[in-house]
Image (cartoon, grey):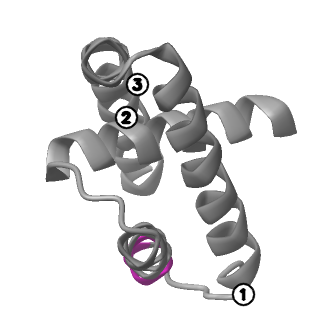
Amino acid sequence: MTYIIGEIIIYVACALIAVFLVPLLKEKLGAEKYAQLLAIVKTAVSAAEKKYEDIDNDNERHFTKKQYVLDYLAEKGISLSEAELDALINSAVLELDKAFQ
């Protein structure tokens, strides 16, 4: 039961971040650059999902995948604030979740 409540809280927090920060980021970067950046983030998120799907511990899997995405973006020279990166990652995760459903 606690696990389900925790998952719901995380999902709602991700949605709120995506709803409020993503439009600000789009405005800051411009629509075309934002679309390119989101495509890169989606690629990194998809790769992390596939690479670390076998980790049983949810917390470990979450942080391992997030670190993979952050490392990938840093490797590509993408430097944004932590809140902006979180918003992009959460937005990509939400879109991938919708695609799987």
Residues under labels 1 and 3: Cα distance?
A: 25 Å
According to the image, label 3 marks what residue? Answer: 15
Proximity of marks 2 and 3: CB atoms separated by less than 8 Å: yes
Instruction: Check disc 1 and give the amino acid type.
Output: Asp
Write the residue at 33% across / 25% down.
29
Instruction: Check disc 3 and give the amino acid type.
Output: Ala
In which quadrant of the rendered image does the C terminus lie?
top right
Quadrant of the rendered image containing residue 64? bottom left
The part of the chain drawn in magenta is: 59-63
Write the residue at 43% across / 56% down.
3
Q: What element carries label 3?
A: helix
Check the image and name the residue furthest to the bottom. 55
According to the image, label 1 marks what residue? Answer: 54
Residues under labels 2 and 1: Cα distance?
A: 23 Å
According to the image, label 2 marks what residue? Answer: 14
Up the image or down, 65 lies above or below 11; here it is below
Residue 62 shown in magenta: yes
Task: Evaluate whether residue 101 shows in this view.
Answer: no
Mark 3: give few (<14), some (14-19) or many (20+) Cα within 10 Å: some
Instruction: Check disc 2 and give the amino acid type.
Output: Cys
